[in-house]
Image (cartoon, rainbow, N blue to C red):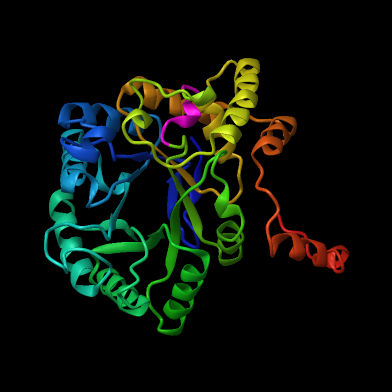
Amino acid sequence: MRYRTLGPSGLLVSELCLGTMTFGGSDGMWGQIGQLQQDEADTLVRAAFDAGINFIDTANVYAGGESERILGQAIRNLGIPRDDVVIATKVLGPMGEGLNARGASRAHIMAQARASLSRLQMDHIDLYQIHGFDAVTPIAETLEALDTLVRQGHVRYIGLSNWAAWQIVRAIGIAEARKLAPILSLQAYYTLVGRDLEREIAPMLRAEGLGLMVWSPLAGGFLSGNYSGGTTANDGRRASFNFPPVDLARGDAAIAVMRGIASAKGCTVAQVALAWLLHQPVVTSVIVGAKRIDQLQDNIRSTEVVLTAEDLAALDSVTKLPPEYPGWMLERQSQYRAPFAPQKG
């Protein structure tokens, strides 16, 4: 397991992050995603920690708070020292019926930070993330609430999730102008069959030095290789929760190439998908979730898969984004000055 600093900080996190969306579900969507209870969650957390994973992600909205509660209890049950793990959670989604029991307002953030700490049985959250963009709340209000939590010691670092590039840059500017706690990272969707963030978000992350945490790195199970040819596995997550959306024609072409690489390397299609992400310089940590210990162990072995330049080129050829304005114009006009541009490592 390798470790990387998270954005512009000295915080070291493992290249794989344990996702806990499968913890605690019962009815509805969360039950379809996962229904792991305490003993099963303890087993996964133990296996992840023993493999060198020191980074764990959850959210207040996962299973209505049950994911946080089960995770916090697992840390206690296993006797894992608090300072040996980096705990990330999120706030935005509905946590009650009231109009103000959702969003990124100061009221909701402050109330939910306390609730998350109680469920986690912890005195601080290492990385507190805004789970999505709230069009109602001014960005400054959100950032000032997060800054208050940092100054109080309840939160160590702050991040965002599922924001557009322009929204993130605007937030960075507000934080810098008002001397608020800096934004450290973005949690976003990124896979071989979902490379949209390469247009605007990835260049922005590199320019601003932010870390990237990748959610759903197997595209909701599609990149396990069990769904090609337009078929849907009977026992997979996509059978009941078909998300994130995937262009099946492009996805099938990608899986065909991935199967060839997996066969040559003696690994699984899923491991190739994860390894590809780990080879992308913009990626800090890849969030892997599981319902079974063998799934988690399979994901962890992706850290041992080395993709050659030829492998990466073959994968790129079937998954790269089609040219889109202004990208193709920027590329064309940049050639005027390309010989004089500084080389970036």
Residue most extreme to the bottom:
177
Q: Nearer the viewer, residue 125 or 253?
A: 253
Q: Quadrant of residue 130?
A: bottom left
Q: Quadrant of residue 193?
A: top right
Coordinates of residue 35 in the picture (x, y in percent): 20, 31
Coordinates of residue 335 in the picture (x, y in percent): 85, 63
Which residue is found at the position 38% from the left and 36% from the top?
A: 242
Q: Quadrant of the C terminus?
A: bottom right
Q: Quadrant of residue 142?
A: bottom left
- Determine whether, in the image, residue 285 is placed left or right of residue 294: right
From this view, report whether residue 161 is shown above or below residue 261: below
Coordinates of residue 288 in the picture (x, y in percent): 40, 36
Which residue is found at the position 47% from the left and 73% from the top?
A: 172
Which residue is found at the position 20% from the left and 62% from the top?
A: 113
Coordinates of residue 264 in the picture (x, y in percent): 65, 16
Q: Nearer the viewer, residue 158 or 134?
A: 134
- Determine whether, in the image, residue 75 is placed left or right of residue 258: left
Which residue is found at the position 23% from the left and 51% from the top?
A: 61
**Number of numbered discs:** 0
From this view, report whether residue 15 is shown above or below residue 164: above
From this view, report whether residue 101 is shown above or below residue 68: below
Q: Nearer the viewer, residue 282 or 191?
A: 191
**Magenta segment boundaries in residue numbering:** 220-226
Q: Is residue 91 magenta?
A: no
